[in-house]
Image (cartoon, coloured by chain):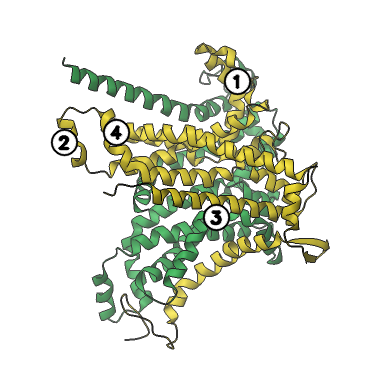
Chain colours: A green, B yellow
Amino acid sequence: MSGVDLRHLTTKVLKHWMLLVFAFVSTAPVALVVINSLKGRRAIFRNPYHLPNADTFDLVGYETVFEKSQFHVYYFNSLFVTLTALALILLFGTMVAFALAEYSFPGNNLLRLFFLLGIIIPIRLGSVSLLRLIVSLDLIGTLWALIVVYVAGGMPLAVFILTQFMSQVPGELKDAARVDGASEYRVFWLILPIIRPATGTVSAISIIPMWNDLWFPLVLAPGEATRTVTLGAQQFMGQFSNDWNALLAALSLSSVPVLIIYFISSKQLLQGLTAGALKN
Amino acid sequence: MTASLPRGSQARRGKPFPTHIIVFLAPAVVIYGLFMIYPLFDSLRLGFFVQVTRGVEQFVGTQNYATLLTDEAILQPRLLNALKNSFLFFAVNMLVQNPVALLLAAALSTKTRGGLLYRVLIFSPAILSLAIAAFVWRLLLSPLWGIVYDILKALGLGAYAQPWLGLESTALITLALISAWQYLGIPMMLYFATLISIPNDLFEAAYVDGATDWQIFWRIKLPLLMPMIGIVSLLTYIGNFNAFDVIFALKGADAGPNYASDTMMTFFYRTFFGSGFQKADPHMGAAVAGTMFVILLAGVLLYLFIRRRIRSYEL
């Protein structure tokens, strides 16, 4: 074997070894939690590295979680907030992007800057005033408080990405529609299918921070009935910090469904992130 | 032609602004303006006021900021401590997460069997909420369960086993490392996306001349990555300077032990809503937010300044 081949082989082995180590470090913690959530208390501590078997299998943790908390409500709240906010971000974001990319009107560049501002400054820094505003609009303690704040916070990045895609849609298509007498609203409607890849990217980037946010649920809607999964799990775990079965079950309940959806859609999600990164 | 203004045509002064443009813009501009831009500026304004009685506010100029910087009983030491910790939190992420992400992206960008699977697995913690991921690590680091201690012992490092989250000297670094662990996949994907967009012919000649992957990475790919390294650094700064979730989830608003893990955001939360040792004061909270605003902006300006100075290679 020549020196070069050997060197290439060594690089290859080292590379896979490193990737394996990091893949393991990234996934093992949650895997260990899920495995142990299915065991009785004694087995959790005696042999944490074993899969549950007939003797050690126990769902007592899950029973506690379902008795003492409202995880199904938390899930409904998180889904309702995230999906409603995402739909509004996509709808309003594409409309703005279409207008910014399609028409030259006075203030176009100013408006782009207006939206760019929100990418740099985190919305959390406006919390003092935001809380007052939400109280004065009588939205405090409702899911709509979260939705409007997430739509506002997610808008700048969505507009930024969508405008880039919008400006690449060929003009002939739109002009052909206009010649046929289509209104500007109809033209917008017609090119929506073309920018579908961009909406995938925007969804991937928008959903994760909304779903995982702890700050605004805590500040704007901390009540039992409006808790999201993140806040609900956090508070439950604070309450039951010595009940290991319940802790492990609560952690599994808040991570496994999300991970399943992630693994199913991971290819599109990562491609969307890659495309988004290249656009910027 | 109706009131439409297709690309290229100019709107003339005096003509009414086309309705359809207003329809397209209005919803987003209203929501974003009302719930993001207005609160940001209004919070800055509130930092210059104090509450006199219920519902009555008085303009006091920079008094809140002066108190923040000079009150030696509580505010000033807390502010300096939080500031130091925020920078440390950022520094740990910058120095640990960034190079590891770059290394992994470099490995993945060459032809790798199972590359997609590696990416999917390494990215997976990033989709979990930080509060959840933090709790997972609290359990793993618990001396009671002893998972991390078992692993350290197996590696012959048993002597280093300490309750890191509970010690003043290590709590903050441990929390920063948990955050770095969780979000490793994001910079990795950004670097990966940049690396695979480099056309092959740029380094095929080098391959023919017998250059190793390593040499090609240092001599060709790294210079092309510089702009993305800048962007990732800026994102790390913006994201980590506001670190809150991981600290609040594990240490509560008081960011113990003895404020050792207190960052600007937990300090902001305590000043705003109050805690055991601090009275709730929204106006002082707004001043803390104003301070953070200035520090963030300074970071962004520094980034823009450096980017103009450093020669970047365009493809």
- Output the chain of dot 2: B
* Circle 4: residue type: Phe
Residue B266 picture location, percent across and down: 67, 43
Residue B4 in the image: above or below residue B247: below
Q: Can marks 2 and 1 be said to lie on one chain?
A: no
Residue A30 picture location, percent across and down: 52, 30
* Circle 1: residue type: Ile
The nearer-to-camera label among 3 and 2 is: 2
Give the Cα separation between the discs numbered 4 and 1: 45 Å
Task: Look at mark 3 in the image and give the residue it sits on.
Answer: A121
Task: Look at mark 4 in the image and give the residue it sits on.
Answer: B217
Q: Quadrant of the N terminus of chain A?
A: top left
SS class, disc 1:
helix
Task: Look at mark 2 in the image and give the residue it sits on.
Answer: B205
Give the Cα separation between the discs numbered 2 and 1: 56 Å
Residue B261 picture location, percent across and down: 66, 35
Give the Cα separation between the discs numbered 4 and 3: 34 Å
Residue A137 in the image: above or below residue A38: below
The nearer-to-camera label among 4 and 1 is: 4
Q: Which mark is residue B213?
A: none
Give the Cα separation between the discs numbered 1 and 3: 44 Å
Q: Are marks 4 and 1 in contact (CB under 8 Å)?
A: no
Q: Which mark is residue A44?
A: 1
Q: A85 or A93, which lies in front? A: A93
Residue A148 in the image: above or below residue A57: below
- Output the chain of dot 4: B
